[in-house]
Image (cartoon, rainbow, N blue to C red):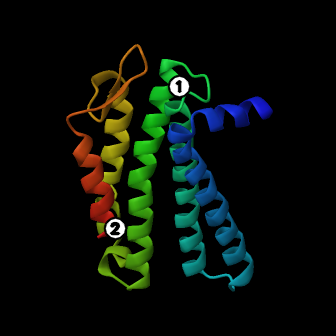
Amino acid sequence: MIICLRSIFDNMDKSMYSVVSAICIFFVYAFYVRTKKGIEPSYKRDLFLRVVKVVLFYLTSDMFWGLIYADLIPTTLLFEKLIYVVFYALSAMVGYSWFLYIEYWQDSVFYKNTFLKYVSKVPMISVIIISVLSIWNGAFFTINADGEYQRGPLFIYQLIVTYGYIL
């Protein structure tokens, strides 16, 4: 425990990212617990809690990314690539989950129409597939043998999908 804390303080500039993610996880989890206990059960509440769960998983993957970047946890190249895959997949899932929640809240045709609901999943699924394939083809990211991360040529696509859902 002391060695881990010493490593965090020694790498404060790099580890601050993970510390902020951990603080966000704490507050989002507290919000999740309070919302689950405090609001009468309903489909709208459950849909919102699903969004919060996806955000928690996203923040956790983000925290792991920061710990890997700061060299605070030992890792293999494959594990590092898997963290990036999960991170990119969850970013699209956060956007899609929020999209569904807002569409339900607005009583939108996207939520009422099953076909449109499935069509609206296509960009999210494509980000998940491309992120998995990035392990081999480098579409979203590449990690060289030294563990250095570089954005791939399709990196902007996952941003467009994630923020497109939110907008």
In which quadrant is the C terminus drawn?
bottom left
Of all residues, the one furthest to the top in this rendering is: 145
Res 106 quadrant in image: bottom left
Q: Residue at position x 29%, y 48% from top?
A: 158
The answer to whether the residue labelled 1 contacts the one labelled 2, judged by CB atoms less than 8 Å apart, is no
Foreground residue, 81 or 9?
Answer: 9
Tell me the tag on residue 166. Answer: 2
**Three-letter amino acid code at the position of disc 1:** Phe
Q: Position of residue 141 (x, y in %)?
A: 32, 32
Residue 159 visible (yes or no):
yes
Q: x%, y% of residue 102?
A: 40, 77
Q: Mark 2 packing: few (<14 Cα in 10 Å), some, or many (20+)?
A: some
Furthest toward the front, the residue is 10
* CA distance separating discs 1 and 2: 29 Å
Of residues 113 and 68, the one drawn nearer to the viewer in this rendering: 68
Secondary element at image label 2: helix
- Secondary structure category for the residue under label 1: helix
Question: Label 1: how many residues lie within 10 Å, few (<14), some (14-19) or many (20+)?
Answer: few
**Picture quadrant where residue 72 is located:** top right
| Left or right: where 88 falls relative to 49 | left
> Which label belongs to residue 79?
1
Q: Residue at x 54, y 73 (%)?
A: 48
Pinpoint residue 84: horizontal percent, then vertical percent: 44, 36
For image coordinates 39% across by 61% down, the residue present is: 95
Residue type highlighted by circle 2: Ile
Q: Which one is nearer the viewer's eye here, 44 or 163?
A: 163
